Amino acid sequence: MVMFFKPQKQSVDRYFDLTIESLDGHCIGVGKKNDRTWFVPNTMIGDEVRVEKKETSQKTGTATVQKYHKKSELRCSEQCCHADKCGGCSCQFIPQEKQIRAKIEGLKQIFSKNVNIKLSEPDDIVTKSPYHYRRTCRLSTYFDSKNGELHLGFRQKNSHAIVDITECSVLKECMSDLLVPVRRFLNSLSIKYSIGHIELTAVDNGIFMLIRFAQKNPSPEDLDKYRMFCESNQINGYFQTDETFEKVYGADHAEYSVNGIKYEFLPNDFIQINEEINKEIINHAIEYLNPQPTDKILDLFCGIGNFSLQLATKAQQVCGVEIVKEMVEQAEKNAKLNALQNVNFVRYDLSQNLNSCQTLFEKYDSILLDPGRKGANEISSFLAKSKIKNILYISCNPITATRDFKILCQGGFMIKKWAIFDMFSNTEHVETVVLLSRAK
């Protein structure tokens, strides 16, 4: 009888030693053991660690650090005292240039796998300070009914628990300085148990705070306390419930400027979190699209006009499309504020069937796409069949972006240029700008 040799699968103990050899696109450490690739958070290239196995597949596995035998010399010191627990940013121990390189290599792998494209090195790599760059944030809250205390901060890593933070090294310093006073003030309110979250924004005309009440409206006494807090700390105060959005103290709107264009918005409107990187992306968008005085450009997911107004200073006509009614109205106000008569805004749900918009799209030479993390699946399918020549796609989610790029490339588009921007330094996230043009 013939006996066939069948190799035994190598088992991996629950605990084992590992040397980290590289970082993946999310800045998670990668090591190899027993023909399996292991992904280990909170590790850096060169770390020698004892890990605990968590999950495995045929070729890969995840593990967590139990002990650092030796920490890599490539590590840098963390500037935040909450960095070991807080999930707000997870990469402070990784030098900025290593973070960016890991994200670039991660993008190349995703493009190769999802789009079957060998992505070149980016035409531009744009970084600014990795600290105190964030001008907006949403702070989570948790009311402990046992001791009557409201906790304020960011979510703990891999948990729904709230880390009470006293400072934050990625927030603008004026916002970080407010964290302790804000927590103290919130705990003085009679309906602190009803607070859902807090939003802070620091722009050209000051700091804005928005309190989101989940269950009931604040009492007159609570509003008086809020007003006094805003006045003593020189901030602008708002609150929001399911039924109302109201100013308590200060300016009627927030504002920022880029390249001489002024933008007004309300504290519950979306703006890009990184002021310096936002300006760089705007300037690169203008450079890549290279709008001429005869060009007509469509700006999809336009928000309050962040790109539309800038493009309107160069092109013949710009149209911005956005689903949120209040942001469309704000964009129209911003166009008037800047005396731009060659830009208009339309409210439309770009996730719906777009066949009825065929004539609208035929009027334009180029399109700027800046969708949220869900990407632009429906619009990409539509554009792939259109006569549009150029698309500038701005993305904060490589997974949904590559899904959309696959559709566009199958429709005849080619990637001409791309850039990476360190919008979210010290986190796993990244912003990309990609110019696609129809193959000639």
Image (tube, helix red, strand yellow):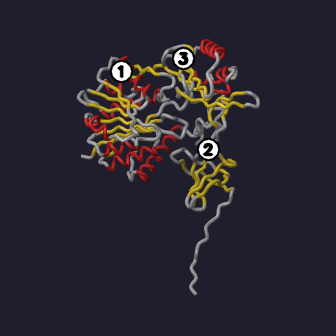
Please tell me the numbered disc located at residue 247: 3
Question: What residue is rendered at 38% in x and 29% in y?
Answer: 307
Question: What residue is rendered at 42% in x and 21% in y?
Answer: 263
Whether residue 124 appears in this view of the structure is no
Please tell me the numbered disc located at residue 42: 2
Please tell me the numbered disc located at residue 83: none
- Residue 77 in the image: x percent, y percent? 62, 36
Q: Residues within 10 Å of mark 3 (few under 14, many from 20)?
A: some
The answer to whether residue 56 is above or below residue 438 is below
Q: Amino acid at mark 1?
A: Ala
The answer to whether residue 282 is above or below residue 229 is below
Quarter of the view holding residue 305: top left
Whether residue 392 appears in this view of the structure is yes
Taking depth in this image into account, of 170 and 413 the one nearest to the observer is: 413
Separation of residues labelled 1 and 2 (CA atoms): 46 Å
Question: What residue is rendered at 61% in x and 37% in y?
Answer: 87
Mark 1 or mark 2: whose residue is earlier in sequence: 2
